[in-house]
Amino acid sequence: SSELTQDPAVSVALGQTVRLTCQGDSLRRYYATWYQQKPGQAPVLVISGKDNRPSGIPDRFSGSSSGNTASLTITGAQAEDEADYYCNSRDSSGYHKVFGTGTKVTVL
Amino acid sequence: EVQLVESGGSVVRPGGSLRLSCAASDFTFDDYGMNWVRQAPGKGLEWVSGINWSGDSTGYGDSVKGRFTISRDNAKNSLYLQMNSLRAEDTALYYCARESLGGCRGTSCWGGFDIWGQGTMVTVSS
């Protein structure tokens, strides 16, 4: 079973803000990274480290963490943000990697 | 352009073997750890295996440990996954992914997977 837990699905009105969460014990020690995956495409890294966006990722995506919970916030959601989002980190041992269960984001 | 291209996926019978390859281009391959991640049809992402820059440290997910072997050839800028004793539940799209540097909180570092290939499909079926 996955050591990182995410809500299965969330919806957000166009232009509004949505926060996705990822919970796991290993997040007390390691940062989470976040990926966006659209149908038929490979995942794309959107947030890493404390709150780092790779080149080309819009600044409406931001990350934060507290205790055993990491969050991805989309401020002013756009239609093109509709996708599956996965968190990822090392597991509690630090040797292996683990993905969250994924959250499907629907933009209304 | 920084790129990863997977190959080797096919249809194989249960109990069979397959070797996947991943060709890297336009970055210094031996600066990075590399990983395989898979996604079964309609399911989420699952980490399969990882290898450090030199190839002397490897790790495996519980579901593949003892059956899969990861390796790399830095001279050829290539990553491999030898899959033995394949099962129906190994059916998935297999991605090659580069492990990013950084993301350190004190001495605990995780930078994520910053470059992904497009994947190669493995189907295990009789």
Image (cartoon, rainbow, N blue to C red):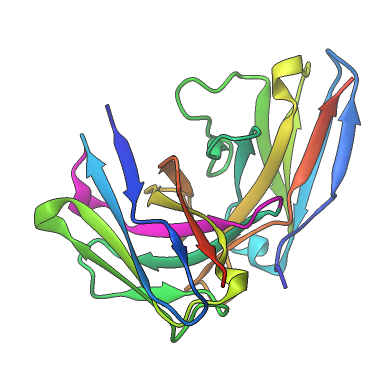
- The quarter of the picture where residue B24 lies is top left
**In this view of the protein, which residue sits in the foreground, B22 or A22?**
B22
The reply to whether residue B122 is visible in this rendering is yes
Residue drawn at x 75%, y 26% is A82
Task: Name above or below for residue A65 compared with residue B20.
Answer: above
Residue A41 position in % (x across, y down): 56, 34
Residue B72 position in % (x across, y down): 23, 63
Left or right side of A10 for B89: left
Magenta region includes residue B123? no
Task: Name above or below for residue B7 compared with residue B65.
Answer: above
Left or right side of B45 for B103: left
Task: Name above or below for residue A60 compared with residue B20.
Answer: above
**In this view of the protein, which residue sits in the foreground, A77 or B125?**
B125
- The quarter of the picture where residue A74 lies is top right
Left or right side of B95 for B4: left
Q: Quadrant of the C terminus of chain A?
A: top right
Residue drawn at x 84%, y 29% is A106
Residue at the limit of the structure toward the front, as seen here: B126
Magenta region includes residue B28? yes
What range is drawn magenta here? B27-42
Residue B118 position in % (x across, y down): 44, 40
